[in-house]
Amino acid sequence: MKPAYWDDATQALGRADPVMRRLIRAVPGVHLVRRGDPLTTLARAIVGQQISVKAAQTIWGRFTAAARAGDGPLDARRLSRMRRDSLRRCGLSERKADYLRDLARHFASGALDPTAWPALDDEALIERLTDVNGIGRWTAEMFLIFHELRTDVFPIGDIGVQKAIAHHYNDGERLAGEALHAIAAPWRPWRSVATWYLWRSLDPVPVEY
C-alpha cells in the first residue's frame, strides 16, 4: 500500500527541485512499500549483512524454519533462548548468531518497544536501534525509511545516495558533508522520499527491506 503522505511528498519535491521532478516523472506508478513486522525486518537486515542476496535468502530460509513455531511470525522470547550452535547450523556466523539473540532480547525485554516509537523523533529511535549489537546507523536509517515510513530521513553515508547526487547534481563528482546537506535542504520534510527516488534513478527496481 502506498504511504499516505506519498503524493503530497512527490508534489512538494517536484515544486522545490526540477531535478527531483524529473526523477519522479521517470518512474511513474511506483512507491515505497512496507513489509514485515519490526523484529522480522531487523533480523533479516542482520542476516543479509555483507553476503550476497542469494546466500542471504538461503540462510534466511533455514533460520526462519528453525526459529519460528510453525507458520507463525518470529517470536522474540523463543529466538532469545535459541542456542548459538542451533543458529550456526543455519549458516550464520557466530557473530550474527549473537547479534540475532541480542536483537531478540531487546524486543523480549521491552528495550525495543514498537508501541513507544511513534513518540520518538528520528534520532531517538536510531539511538534505540543502534543499542542492538549488529545494528549500525545505516541499518537503522533503512529501517526508519522502509519500515517505519519516516518521511525525513537522509542517509548521508549511503553510497547509492552519494553516487546519485554526484550524477544528477555535480557532474559526477562526489560530494560530502555540508555540500550534501545543502543539496538536500529543499527536500525537507520529505528527504526519505527524495532518497528513494535517487535510488530509483540508479536502479528502477525497488529494493525491499
Image: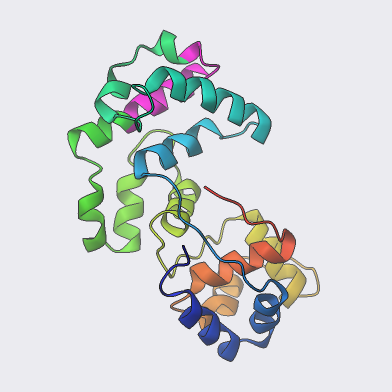
Tell me the residue at 54%/85% (across/down).
11
Locate residue 177: give its quadrant. bottom right
Relative to 51, say whether 196 is above or below.
below
| Image position, residue 121 (x, y; %) | 29, 64
Locate residue 133: give its quadrant. top left
Q: Is residue 109 left or right of residue 137?
A: left
Residue 51 in the magenta stretch? The answer is: no
Q: Is residue 52 visible?
A: no
Tell me the residue at 43%/78% (across/down).
189
**Which residue reaches farthest front?**
71
Locate residue 21: give its quadrant. bottom right
Tell me the residue at 47%/56% (across/down).
146
Q: Is residue 96 left or right of residue 67?
A: right
Give the residues in magenta.
88-103
Q: Is residue 124 left or right of residue 61?
A: left
| Image position, residue 89 (x, y; %) | 50, 10
Magenta-drawn stretch, dominant element (helix, strand or loop): helix
| Image position, residue 175 (x, y; %) | 67, 68
Q: Depth check: 14 or 99 in front?
A: 14
Relative to 127, say whether 178 is above or below.
below
Q: Is residue 19 visible?
A: yes
Tell me the residue at 52%/19% (across/down).
93
Q: Depth check: 30 or 104 in front?
A: 30
Residue 96 in the magenta stretch? The answer is: yes
**Which residue reaches farthest right?**
171
Q: Is residue 187 left or right of residue 82?
A: right
